[in-house]
Image (tube, helix red, strand yellow):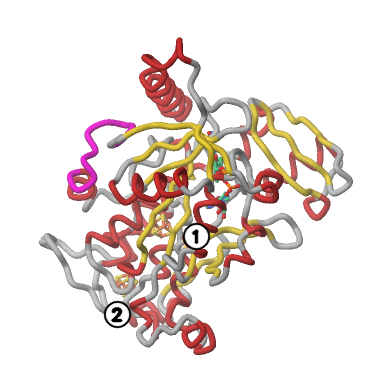
Amino acid sequence: MEEVKSKNLLLKEIKTFKELEKEIIDNNKCCACGACVAYCTSQGFDVIKMDGNKPIYITDANIDNCKECGICYYICPNTTPLIDQINEEFQIIDELGHIITVIAAKTTDQEIKKLGQDGGIVTTVLTYLFEQDRIDAAIVSEYDENFKPVPKIIYDKKDLLKSAGTRYSISSNILPLKDFNKISQEIMNKKDILNIEDLSIAFVGTPCQCRAIRKMQHLSISPIYSIRFVIGLFCFENFDYDKLFEIIEKETKLVPANVLKAQIKKNFFVTSRENKVFEVDIKKLDEAVRDHCHECDEFTGRFSDFSVGASGAPEGYSIIIIRTNEGQNLINSLLSEGFIDKYNIPAKEISEWKTKKINWFRKMTSLKTKKGK
Ligand SMILES: Cc1cc2nc3c(=O)[nH]c(=O)nc-3n(C[C@H](O)[C@H](O)[C@H](O)COP(=O)(O)OP(=O)(O)OC[C@H]3O[C@@H](n4cnc5c(N)ncnc54)[C@H](O)[C@@H]3O)c2cc1C
Ligand code: SF4
Ligand code: SF4
Ligand code: SF4
């Protein structure tokens, strides 16, 4: 991860991890995406690491190993540099970002239907990309045995079902790219790939994580160009894992190891491994919302190729906001090949359906930013 071809970037003043700590991390503005640690130019010299959800210097003695390249500061999704440039690149002029079209759709795969969070769109898209040999890897999130999110690079469609469903706490999905170069020879041979940079990857993440990916792509940081598809998830807020489960346990007596699924539908619903469903008033979870989410103005994933959510979707379907030509071509292929079914808008609603949805997303985004104040 050494090579940086600075494109359109005039570094008037280099800011390093010291400033990142001062301005972002110590000010509770870090969303724990993992980008700074994954792409630190001095990785071989052990300068920074994630300590749980917090990036830190490994030891005071290692601070001097920092090359003061400024990469960690520039690619952080919550710093201001490069935002204007990526807004321009992705034609973003307002809070919803560039929208080619909006549809509602659901998977046609019965197994994904059972395990997917909403319409199972994300898992179906990844299945399709693996089956068509259009990706060699996908970056997703899994659960550990305590229902804690774990970011992961997977290389096979058979591992996809474990990642279906939403984790309502941080999964530092950019972090696995740190180990990208350690990909086993066995996988390279199996995929008939000689050069690691020829891999094709799909990335799934929250809007803040997608923003970090776009900043890295703007700087052409190797090997970020292996990320061919950026799939965004709608995101109203995210919770601190420990605080969330302290409240859930108090309210339901369920311990994390006994949780099978979590879902927000106005309130927070948890399903136990015995298939019992518990409802927790969402307001009771306010205390567990991560600080950085209060300042976030992204709801619909502006920096993705397409973004997916349940908000505004008919029951059993997902909403898909298509934003780039790559995103549009991909979703069209899944529709025409029967991987997903499009919601048929009733005739009397057709003329205003899309406008109504867009107004709804605007309202949700405004609600989110007001809540944060
Ligand atoms: C923290 C959070 C808050 C959300 N809030 C809203 C909301 O307010 N309104 C709304 O409409 N939608 C929200 N979503 C999105 C929604 O919950 C679904 O993820 C989305 O509709 C996709 O559903 P699906 O059935 O297509 O996905 P599935 O096929 O079930 O696939 C889900 C994909 O998301 C990935 N993933 C799950 N959790 C995380 C995570 N924490 N970080 C990164 N990747 C993850 C999984 O690896 C998987 O690839 C939220 C998602 C997250 C992660
Ligand atoms: S070497 Fe560069 S990326 Fe790593 S901590 Fe220092 S400034 Fe940040
Ligand atoms: S790059 Fe990500 S993990 Fe690092 S400080 Fe910024 S938000 Fe936090
Ligand atoms: S609310 Fe914003 S900052 Fe928080 S996880 Fe979602 S996209 Fe990231």
Q: Quadrant of the N terminus?
A: bottom left
Identify which residue is drawn at 49% across, 34% down: 319
Relative height, residue 197 to residue 262 (above, below): below
Residue at point 25%, 78% (across, down): 3
Q: Secondary structure at mark 2?
A: loop
Tell me the tag on residue 2.
Answer: 2
Q: Which residue is the site of mark 1? A: 173
Residue at coordinates 41% horizontally, 81% vertically from top-left?
Answer: 62
> Which label's residue is closer to the chain start, 1 or 2?
2
Does the magenta-highlighted stretch encompass residue 94?
A: yes
Q: Magenta segment, which residues? A: 88-97
Q: Which of 96/199 is in front?
A: 199
Is 60 or 104 nearer to us in this picture? Answer: 104
The residue lying furthest to the top in this view is 348
Q: Is residue 244 left or right of residue 290?
A: right
Viewer-closest of 295 and 138: 138
